[in-house]
Image (tube, grey):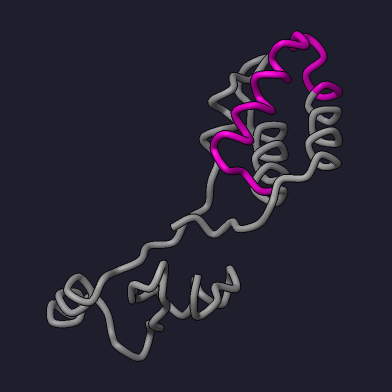
Amino acid sequence: MSVYRGELSQKELVRNAAKIKAAFPALPPEFFQILIERFKAKGFCDARMIDAVNNVIDNCPYPTPTLANFLSYDKSVKLYDYSQFCSLVTQGYAKWENYDRIKVGGVVFYVSKGDRARYNIPDEI
């Protein structure tokens, strides 16, 4: 499950497009039109877009980035259903006290307490 939730604002789209343009001046205007369209289509929120832009600026190995360099960025946590979690516990890979129950779309899953605290995951999504 992605740790990012929220909306994508026009203000942040414009600010981050300008940041990309400043970092990679050779990119054509069409690149930004497609990138913004794809950010919207893939359900990016402001925080994910900001992190993706910063990641590409910091780590792009080539003179110019590709759309995929931005669009593939995500942070996620592993969720386990009851059966999967019971298997982990019985095999000795997990302990009940290290995991919390959360609901995603009304379905119960288990997530590590460390991930839950790190990404501020609520009881129900």
In the rendered image, residue 25, in percent from the top left (x then y), is placed at 82, 14
Task: Name the residue located 63 percent from the left edge and 36 percent from the top edge.
Answer: 40
Residue 19 in the image: above or below residue 25: below
Q: Is residue 23 magenta?
A: yes
In the rendered image, residue 83, in percent from the top left (x then y), is placed at 17, 74
Q: Which residues are magenta?
A: 21-45
Q: In the figure, is residue 38 to the left or right of 31?
A: left
The residue nearer to you, when weighing 106 against 22, is: 106
Task: Name the residue located 20 percent from the left edge and 74 percent from the top edge.
Answer: 88
In the rendered image, residue 14, in percent from the top left (x then y), is placed at 84, 33
Q: In the figure, is residue 85 to the left or right of 27?
A: left
Picture quadrant where residue 50 is located: top right
Q: In the figure, is residue 88 to the left or right of 28?
A: left
Q: Residue furthest bottom?
A: 97
Picture quadrant where residue 18 is located: top right
In the rendered image, residue 35, in percent from the top left (x then y), is placed at 65, 24
